[in-house]
Amino acid sequence: MAELNSFVDFFRKKYGARMQKVVVDAGFTCPNRDGSKGTGGCSFCLNNAFHPNYCTPDKPIHQQIDEGIEFHRVRYRHAQRYIAYFQPYSNTYAPVERLRELYAEALSHPLIEGLVIGTRPDCIDEEKLDLLKSIEEDGKIVIIEYGIESCYDKTLERIGRGHDFDCARRAVEATAKRGLTQCAHFIFGLPGETLQMMMDEADIINTLPLTSVKFHQLQIIKGTRMEEVFRTQRQDFHEFTLDGYLDFMAEFIPRLRNDIYIDRFASEVPPRYLSPLQKGWGLIRYQELLAMLRQRMSAPADT
């Protein structure tokens, strides 16, 4: 019977405790929005749907952290150790000196023990990786999260990513050479991908020197270009039911290398952001989904 290799376990083994991420919005944009590679972002993206209301770029970073810690103390009463999560948009998309200032501001908060940096693989270079490595060498936790989304170039082009999979591979390999902890995001259910194509991505992911992965089922967000594609080309989408997705993940996860940790396997977007075109799974929290997946993965094969 397969087991889920949770990223929470990685933290407990390496740092002796679970760390709570506190989202920070430092006002970054991305090359797929400012015109250098595109405008409007990726076809599936509406960033407000994926981060909490307390973090807005008009607030100082310390204020966002204070409000975020209070938010988590109410929601997760056992949270005691915190890391700043630079999440919205591409958080290495600035000159290195500006990055140094922003990261240092977050790290100067007395309750912050490290950084999680969400970014794109085409927004990293040697100088930025050296900066992040120097922060780690100063005794801080550093994790880089790359949005890769798909292993297939045709899909990446169709959703308007502005980079190919080889770009992602180069970024992941350069990060691994410095020994930095890194995570990669992938989306299941993107247009043009069959169930078998998605399952085959496990073999490709296994070739990447990743520490952990985040998987998300495609959720159609109101007002995105993806919503219009879904409206007019619905036949190109593999639409996961809740049971279908749990069955898929219960088969997919055991195909991954044993040393790859699972940070998340599903997403939960507030219902107000979801398109009425897509039948949702109802109001179900991630911890409930996780319990359901664990039960599936631990059940005998003939049940």
Image (cartoon, rainbow, N blue to C red):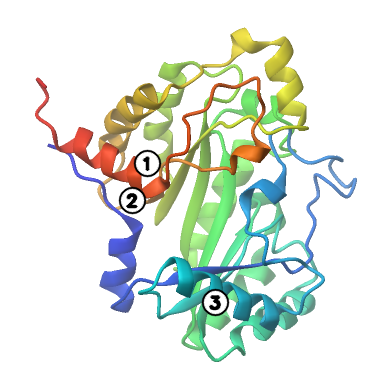
Viewed as shown, does residue 267 lie left or right of 39? left
Residue neighbourhood size for the residue with mark 3, other residues' Cα within 10 Å, grouped as few (<14), some (14–19), many (≥20): some
Q: Secondary structure at mark 1?
A: loop
Q: Which mark is residue 70?
A: 3
Q: Which residue is mark 2?
A: 260
Tell me the quarter of the image containing the C terminus.
top left
Q: Of discs 3 and 2, which sits in the foreground? A: 3
- On the rendered structure, is 37 left or right of 167? right
| In this rendering, the label closer to the viewer, 3 or 1 | 3
Q: Position of residue 167 (x, y in %)?
A: 63, 44
Mark pair 3, 2: CA separation:
32 Å
Residue at (53% x, 53% y) in the render:
172
Above or below 154: residue 51: below
Could you tell whether 44 is left or right of 188 in the image? right
Q: Earlier in the sequence, mark 2 or mark 1?
A: 1
Question: What's under tag 2, amino acid-wise?
Answer: Ile
How far across and down, in percent of the image, does residue 101 sit?
Answer: 74, 82
Q: Secondary structure at mark 2?
A: loop
In the drawing, what numbered circle is on residue 66?
Answer: none
Query: Is the C-beta separation of discs 2 and 1 under 8 Å?
Result: yes
Would residue 209 be visible to someone looking at this image? no
Distance, label 3 to label 1, CA atoms, is 38 Å
Which amino acid is tagged 1?
Asn
The alpha-carbon separation of the residues under discs 2 and 1 comes to: 8 Å
- In the image, 57: left or right of 255? right
x, y percentage for residue 252? 32, 31
